Image (cartoon, grey):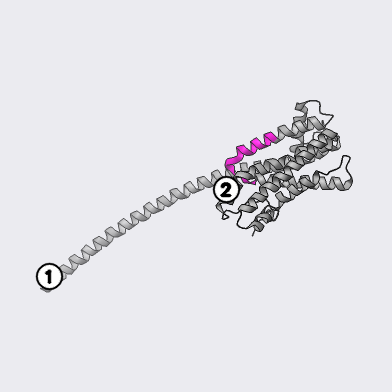
Amino acid sequence: MRHWLRTVGSYGVEPHDTPAAVRAWRRLQWPLFAALLLLIPAFYLELVGLATALLIARCMYLFVGLTCIGILGHMLSKSRRPSRFMRRNALDAALGLAALASVAGGRVPWSAVEWAWKLFFMAALALRIVLALRAFFVPHRLLVLLGIGAAILALAGAGFYWLEPGVHSYADGLWLAFESSATVGYGDVAPTTPASRVFAVFVVLLGYGLLSLTFASIAALFVGEEEKQLRRDMHRDIKRVESEVSAMREEVQMLRELLMRDLSRHHQERQGVQH
């Protein structure tokens, strides 16, 4: 049965697509992902509310939207089955279109409808990030996951230092980012502004995701070691059984040869008696 996340649509090209499409996707998938990540600072630049920040955010939205359309359009020209490619990557197409729509976004404070739209937009982006990181859900990439977690913690600390008035140093921002991502909630520092609270929501979601992947990878690492030991034990047992079977075959062959010699001697003796 197909995994339900495949219906979301962020799965690149099929392995048996044209060689040109496969090569193009290997070259363009990470630039596309990097462009989509620009939606995060664009969102918070909008929340700042200043005219300059809003202009920068709109330029970033325009860049992301045009990049998504350009890359996906290029892939459609390379793919053997364009409609299937679009179904597999509908989430990227939707994010690109949403980025273009956000160019005409209004100033803060947003209405309830605009807030719902923006939060749904960012939730879709968070899902896209999780889908991009699913390839690292293997034991030998645990260090990569830890590195990504450290980078997100550093960026989240900077985000809280920028957005939260109660955070007076980058160290306090890191501490608040750790509290949020680990869902500890000591209460000594807490988000107080709408911007920092929305930021905390996404930090918590990313923290849940990365912690789950990290702990699952650690568990898979131990399970993998146990499986390796089990395979070694099975290989040793199979070798022992093979040696025992080989020895039994040799013994059976020796007994057969002895029996054949006894039968031959007995037959010769009977012939001698008859003569």
Quarter of the rendering containing residue 145: top right
Q: What's the magenta region?
A: 134-151
Q: Nearer the viewer, residue 7 or 146?
A: 7
Q: Is residue 262 above or below residue 184?
A: below
Q: Magenta stretch containing residue 139, yes or no?
A: yes
How dense is the environment of label 2, judged by Cα within 10 Å: few (below 14), some, or many (20 and up)? few
Question: With 267 as the anchor, is 192 left or right in this view?
Answer: right
Q: Which residue is situated farthest in the bottom direction here?
A: 274
Q: Nearer the viewer, residue 131 or 229?
A: 131
Residue contact between numbered discs 1 and 2, judged by CB atoms under 8 Å: no
Question: With 9 as the anchor, is 192 left or right in this view?
Answer: right
What residue is drawn where x is 79% and y is 36%? Answer: 56
Where the N terminus falls, by quadrant?
bottom right
Q: Nearer the viewer, residue 267 or 4?
A: 4
In percent of width and height, residue 68 lies at 70, 46
The amino acid on which the numbered mark 1 sits, given as a three-letter code, is Gly
Q: Magenta stretch containing residue 208, yes or no?
A: no
Residue at numbered disc 1: 272
Residue at numbered disc 2: 23
